[in-house]
Image (tube, coloured by chain):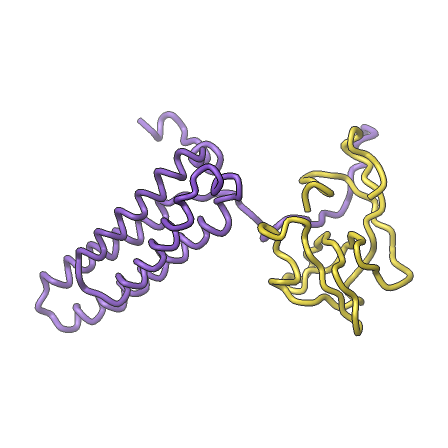
Amino acid sequence: MFLTDLLKPKTIAYAHCDLPCGVYDPEQARIEAESCYKIIEKYNASSDDQFKTRAIVIKEERAELAKHHIDVLWSDYFKPEHVQKYPEITELCWKAAKQCSKVKGSLDIGEAKTLLDMIDKIADVWTKAGGPTATRMPKAAAARA
Amino acid sequence: MEPALCDGDWVIVAPLARPPRVGEIVLARDPRVPGRLVLKRVARVKGGVCTLLGDRPEESTDSRTFGPVALSAVLGRAVFRYAPLLRAGLL
């Protein structure tokens, strides 16, 4: 047994925030926003009232999830130094979160498209801020091919 | 809790025979998760509870999220960091 094994603490205490996994990716919000887009498309193409009702319920749920993921990026991933370097991120996240509410209450596919564009702008900043390497795990080469 | 404490620091916690004092870093039971322990700085002590805050308010999850912590859930005071050696010293 090494000395370090003896000295090593037996108890772990957390001094930082909420069990942070450190994985943040705007793609998570985008997938939910894409769901909203596709659901509105399907809603408009359908004449089945029951289907349409379900579509609305699911779209509202997905819009709420998109909002949640944007909030997490904004409050947990982006740090003061990112905001200093990319001051536009504050407004981008704020507007995108508001746009989620719009999509939640609307069946206008244009609103869903606007949300996708807004999330893409957030993703641009996330990429510039080093997000892909800082927060994501590399995939195995075989899986990427 | 950076810069006072960093991820992976090895710390000695002394049991507290008296109520914690403002400014001390204490080990306390997380009121939200049984069995989970947190290290935070005492911001206020009053009426059997204390308010615990992280040193980095913009990132910390502390009493602003989990509320005041009962003094009975405060287990000890972080007194000394013994590893990494370069940063060893009193807290």
Q: Nearer the viewer, residue A35 or B67?
A: B67
Spot the purple chain and give its letter.
A
| Picture quadrant of residue A101 | bottom left
Q: Nearer the viewer, residue A110 or A49?
A: A110
**Quarter assignment of residue A26:** top left
Q: Is residue A80 left or right of residue A127?
A: right
Q: Residue at x 66, y 62 (%)?
A: B63
Q: x and y percent of residue A39 in the render?
A: 20, 59
Outermost residue on the right side: it is: B17
The location of residue B48, given as percent across then percent down, is: 80, 72
Q: Position of residue B12 (x, y in %)?
A: 83, 45
Work out which quarter of the rendered image holds the C terminus of chain B and state it. Answer: top right
Question: x, y percentage for residue A36?
Answer: 25, 57
Q: How many marks?
A: 0
Q: Is residue A95 left or right of residue A37?
A: right
Residue A59 is at least partly visible in this image: yes
Measuring 73% from the left and 52% from the top, which residue is drawn there? B39
The answer to whether residue A6 shows anywhere in this view is no
Relative to B62, does residue B6 appear above or below in the rendering? above
> Left or right of A10: which side holds A140?
left
Chain coloured yellow in this rendering: B
